[in-house]
Amino acid sequence: MSSYGEQIAALPIHWDKKGNLKVLMVTSRDTGRWVMPKGWEMNGRKPWDAAAIEAVEEAGAVGYISREAIGSFVYDKRLDDGSVMPCRVQVYPMIVEKLKRSWKERHERKRKWFSPKGAAKRVHEPELSKLLTSLSDRPRRQPILRQLLRRV
């Protein structure tokens, strides 16, 4: 059995009019820092489907999600009782087709597009920062993104 809580995250991305890759981040509800839309795995759902649900609920982002994780990171989740649980988060890239004007957590979070390097500077988790930074150089060459682009 894993000593980590298993979570999933969506990595919502799109290319702007200039052809630059952008990453959609949301603020966390407790501290207001910038994070990926993420949550616990869901019973009866594939992990990538759960990540897509989190993207809609937390960021209002709808699009095509990869069935393959592009990477993972570990962070300490503070639970309601004040204790801390280390969590491993599998990150699934998602090409955003549209952003909803109205979504479940819109009154609890902000959302904003960043460059991969800009997003990397704002997250606290070193592994996630490294993953985001890796997207800044020729993102279309990343095997998982290339596969996802072919499906779109």
Image: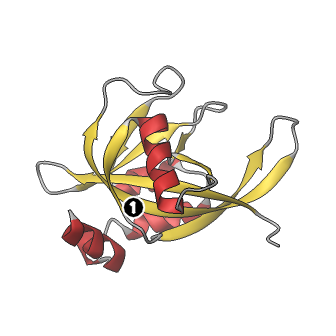
**Residue placed at 57% from the left, 57% from the top?**
8
Residue found at the far front of this picture: 44
Residue at which label 1 appears: 93
- Colour scheme: secondary structure
SS assignment at label 1: strand
Where 69 sits versus 83, above or below? below
Query: Where does residue 109 sit, x and y in percent of width and height?
Result: 51, 28
Query: Where does residue 61 sit, x and y in percent of width and height?
Result: 35, 41
**Residue placed at 42% from the left, 39% from the top?**
56
* Amino acid type, label 1: Pro
Where 6 sits versus 27, above or below? below
Query: Where does residue 122 sit, x and y in percent of width and height?
Result: 50, 47
Would residue 26 be visible to someone looking at this image?
A: yes
**Quarter holding the N terminus?**
bottom right
**Residue placed at 45% from the left, 24% from the top?**
106
- Classify 10 Å Cα crowding around label 1: few (below 14), some (14-19), many (20 and above): many
**Residue placed at 65% from the left, 33% from the top?**
31
In this view of the protein, which residue sits in the foreground, 16 or 53? 53
**Quarter holding the C terminus?**
bottom left
Residue found at the far left of this picture: 17
* Left or right of residue 123: residue 110: left
In this view of the protein, which residue sits in the foreground, 36 or 41? 41
Query: Where does residue 23 sit, x and y in percent of width and height?
Result: 35, 51
* Left or right of residue 14: residue 37: right
Where 23 sits versus 139, above or below? above
